[in-house]
Image: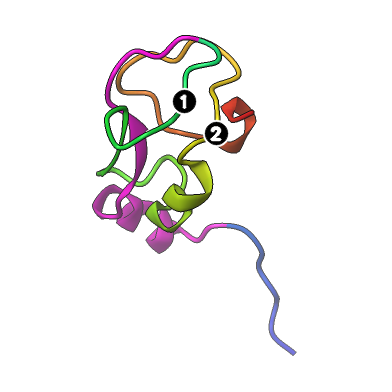
Amino acid sequence: MGRVRYGVTENEMSSRVFRRSLFIVKDMQAGEVFSEDNVRSIRPGHGLSPKHFQDVRGRKARCHLEKGTPLQWDVIA
């Protein structure tokens, strides 16, 4: 039986650059609401998948977020 590998393969890591993900496009303060004005789907794929935008929109930032930050679940209240 073949060896089972978990995690991201080398090929997947190199293709991440071409994927889109959610990024902060304007500086945000803690408590500010995520919207189309401050979150966009751009490359590279280092943040949340764009499919999660509807789950994020309307929720609030837990902390100050700078423009260019990849969006992650731990900063969403």
Measuring from the top left, give residue 48's x and y in whole percent.
Answer: 47, 45
Residue highlighted by disc 1: 33
Q: Which mark is residue 47?
A: none
Residue that appears at 34% across and 13% down: 27
Measuring from the top left, give residue 12's x and y in whole percent.
Answer: 41, 60
Q: Residues within 10 Å of mark 1 (few under 14, many from 20)?
A: some
Q: Is residue 65 left or right of residue 3?
A: left
Residue 23, magenta (yes or no): yes
As displayed, is residue 19 above or below residue 5?
above
As displayed, is residue 37 above or below residue 32?
below
Q: Look at the numbered disc 1 and give the secondary structure of its residue.
A: loop
State how many labels appear.
Answer: 2
Q: Residues within 10 Å of mark 2 (few under 14, many from 20)?
A: some
CB within 8 Å, label 1 to label 2:
yes
Measuring from the top left, give residue 65's x and y in whole percent.
Answer: 44, 15
Residue that appears at 30% across and 37% down: 36
Q: Is residue 8 left or right of residue 54?
A: right
Residue highlighted by disc 2: 59
Which stretch appears magenta? Answer: 8-29
**Image quarter in which the C terminus is found:** top right
Three-letter amino acid code of the residue under disc 1: Val
Residue 26, magenta (yes or no): yes
Which residue occupies the extreme right position in the image? 1
Please state which of residues 15 and 60 is positioned toward the viewer in this rendering.
60
As displayed, is residue 58 above or below residue 11?
above
Q: Look at the numbered disc 2 and give the secondary structure of its residue.
A: loop
Please state which of residues 44 and 36 is positioned toward the viewer in this rendering.
36
Q: Is residue 59 left or right of residue 5?
A: left
**Image quarter in which the N terminus is found:** bottom right
Measuring from the top left, give residue 38's x and y in whole percent.
Answer: 31, 27
As displayed, is residue 2 above or below residue 24?
below
N-term mark: 1 or 2: 1
